[in-house]
Each structure stands twice: as structure tokens, then as C-alpha cells.
Amino acid sequence: MIIEMKNIRKSFDGLEVLKDISFGVDSGEVVSIIGPSGSGKSTLLRCATFLETIDGGEILYMGEHAAHTDESGNAVYVSPHELRHFRSYCGLVFQQFNLFPHYSILKNIIDAPVHVQHRNIEEAKTEAMELLSKMGIADKADAYPYQLSGGQQQRVAIARALAMNPEILFFDEPTSALDPELTGEVLKVIRQLADEKMTMVVVTHEMPFAKAVSNRVIFMDGGVIVEQGDPLKVFEDPQEERTKQFLRVFER
Amino acid sequence: MTLTTMISTMAAGMLRTTGIFALTLIGSLPLGMVVALLRKSRFAPVRGIIRGFISIMRGTPLMLQLLVWYFGPYYLFGWNIGNWRFPALILGFVLNYAAYFAEIYRGGIESIPVGQYEACEVLGYTKSQTFMRVILPQVIKNIMPSVTNEVITLVKDTSLAFTLAYQEVFSLAKQISASQTSFMPFLIAGIFYFIANYLVEIIMNRIEKSMDYYK
Ligand SMILES: Nc1ncnc2c1ncn2[C@@H]1O[C@H](COP(=O)(O)OP(=O)(O)O)[C@@H](O)[C@H]1O
Ligand SMILES: [Mg+2]
């Protein structure tokens, strides 16, 4: 298992957002998370990538504990220094891209490898150019984010995350901020990564994509995992009433 | 007094004006950042003290502050500090402008979307790397127009140094005008200030342009 989250609990001032959620992702697996807005999908991803701290439960990367629960039921994290090591296992692609506007595309991608991982700058550049070619935007290396379309910016964000060589990449609604005609180009590169056996967890409302690309679909609602399994099974023959209701909305 | 002597005497005063101006910026631009960061400190008492400091600096006349810095040590503590005029002047200007710059910086820092911090966090940047590499460059670009305003105000505010009878261009203009019963010195001072601010505008425009490469 790349990541394992066990019995995760998370509240925001009294409001319980994640209620005892457990899930794990194997190497090379592509997991889609679907569910209505407010069901806790983003919070789950943010806990997995250490942007939020869990209240209770366990987080393991590569079998090692990043957080565990003490006798009183509270989550305890490893030291900030050790946490940096756990962070390096995961990457996150945001709905709003969050590129650095003052850096060129190339610099957006190489800055963290060079200044966080202390990699050789030439090597980092070569690798960044390869990633940009793969994303189909090698000609944009010297441009600035504002000069790119949303779809191109999101592909840069994906390249930036991949440049850190994470074990697992999380996507939080990577196409939700894009005009409909631009979602395809982003989904295409995610699909391409799936073909290369990149381990990924994708929160998405793109049902055909989830069905076609993922090995497993998780349906979340109200802070719990209502149903999960093989995409064909979940989409064609959902067992839970709530899943059926949710999926009905997406059929036309 | 011939016009040439008048101009050259006042040019010497303008040099002192420039001295106040430069030292104030050198001191208050970085100090303002320290104040802005302390203003967001984790420790409530620190935040409180800094807020009080900013309120006082912005809520009382700079002229009054200069008088307090100059006469305060003697009247409050009986200290007689030699050659205190110029240090008191610079202290007064630096602290006052640091408070204004701090508020400009704070506004600039708060305008950076939280997503920038989160992207940095996920990529493993340390807090100081996040600030120096990602936040600060964007803050500087955002606040440039407000800083320009403040710098132009400073050029004119240097004339408040006359309160402490420091011989900068405005004090000299008043003196020469009185002794020569001439209006000319004020005209010359006005031209000097105008030229100074014209240069400031050109320089600040250049700096703003140099950051135009992104939006
Ligand atoms: N930082 C926060 N502070 C308070 N409430 C939050 C915060 N983040 C999320 N929430 C709440 O948690 C719930 C789940 O949010 P989220 O994880 O964003 O759901 P989803 O991504 O599935 O739409 C929502 O009710 C949301 O309002
Ligand atoms: Mg969300």
C-alpha cells in the first residue's frame, strides 16, 4: 500500500466532516472519489496531503505511520521534520491550479525540485522539459501562467507535482474550474498517467472518465464512504440507495 | 544675496533633505516588514503592542512625534544626549514611516490567495522559503502603487524637519526669505521638491514596469 488511512475523524468547529473513514491505495491503482458537494472529499485529500490535521485515526505512507491515535483517541503526528519526509511521498493538484504567477512555466516546475529536494538544476530542467513535452506544452516553457489557458495551466500544475517524483498523486476536481471544452485535454494526460501506472486518487464529477480510467470508485456522502468498488459495478449496479440517487442526477 | 548664492545655499539644504529622505527609506522599508510580521505574530501581547504602536504612529502628527523624540529624553528622563538633533529626526521619521509601510505590507500579504501557501506546503517548501520565494515577490508587485504614494509624501514630509531647526531646504527657505525679505527662496524650494518628486515618479515607474512581466 502506498497510503493507508484508518478511522479518520475530522471536524471543523463542531461540524464532523469525516466520520471514521478508512481507505487505502495500492501501488499503480487509480481511485476515483465521487460524491455530492460538501461530502468531505476535499477534506479527505487535504488530510492525506497534510494540509489539514486529522482529529483521530491513522495515516500511513509506505507502511510507516505519519499519524497515529494515542490512548485518549487523539491523533498524534510525527515531528515536523519527519513530516517533511512523508510529504515527499504525495503530490496534490488543485482545482484552482495555484501556479506561481511570478515564475515562468519552467521555473514553476523546477523551483521545488531545486530548492526543496536540492536537485541539480540542469537535471531538473531536462526532466521538466520532458514532463512539459508529455503534457503537450513544451513550447510554453518560457511563458508565464497568465498567458496560458486554464487547461494548459492545469497541465503545468500536474507537471509541477510530478517533478517531485511523488509515490502518489491526488487530484481535487482538476477540471471543475475549466471551460467544458478544455476538460478533455486535462483528462487525457491523467489517463495517460494511469496507463503508465502512476498511483492516483482523483476527486471528480466526470463520471465517464471515472468509469473508464479508474480501478476503483468511492462514493462519499456526509463524511462517510457509502459504497466503493469496481467502477462498472458501482456505476451500473449501485447497491446503496444514496448512490443510486446521486448517479441518477448525472444521467440524462 | 545673489540668486546664485541663494540657489547654492539651498542646494546644500536639499542635500540634507535628501539625507533625511534616504535614511528614512533605508530604515523604514525593512523595519515596516518586521512590524508587519510581528503584527501577525502568534503571541497576542506582541500583536497588541504592535497594533498600539501603529495606532499611535498614524494617529498623532509626525511633527509632534519629532518633538517628542527630540525633547523627550531630556524632559522625561533628564538625559542630555550630545548631537541628538539628527538622530532624533531620523528616529522619528523611520518609526513613523515604518508604521505606514507595515500597514501597506500587511494589506499586500493578506491579498495573496491561500492557494499559494498551500501549493508551497504540498511541494515541501519551508515557511521561510514560502515567504521569500513565493509570497514576498508578489506582495512587492501588489503594493508598489501604495509605496510610491508614501515615498512621494515622504519627500514633502521631510520639510517637517524644520520643527527641530534642522537646516534642510525648507528651514533654509524660511530663514533666507525672512533675512532677505524675498519670496524667491520659497519658489526655489518648491522647484526643488517638485524635481525630487519627478525623479521619484520616474524611478518608481521603472520599478513597476520591471515587474510587469506577469499578472
Ligand atoms: N476550513 C474549513 N473550515 C470550516 N468548515 C470547512 C472547512 N473546510 C471544509 N469545511 C466544511 O466541511 C464540509 C466538507 O467540505 P469539503 O471537504 O470541501 O467537501 P467536498 O470537497 O466534498 O465538496 C463542508 O460542509 C464544508 O463547509
Ligand atoms: Mg471539494
Image (tube, rainbow, N blue to C red):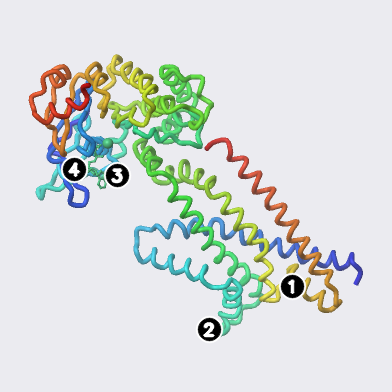
Q: CA distance from mark 1 to mark 4?
A: 67 Å
Q: CA distance from mark 1 to mark 3?
A: 58 Å
**Residue assigned mark 2:** B76
**Chain ID, mark 2:** B
Q: CA distance from mark 3 to mark 4?
A: 25 Å
In this rendering, position of residue B104 left or right of residue A176: right
Specify whether disc 1 shares its chain with disc 3: no
Cβ of disc 2 within 8 Å of ligand 1? no
**Residue assigned mark 1:** B171
Of circles 3 and 4, the one toward us is 4
Residue at the image point whose x is 29% and y is 44% from the top: A80
**Residue assigned mark 3:** A80
**Chain ID, mark 4:** A
Specify whether disc 3 shares its chain with disc 4: yes
Q: Which image quarter: residue B150?
A: bottom right
Q: Are marks 2 and 1 in contact (CB under 8 Å)?
A: no
Of circles 2 and 3, the one toward us is 2
Front position in the image: A134 or A218 = A218
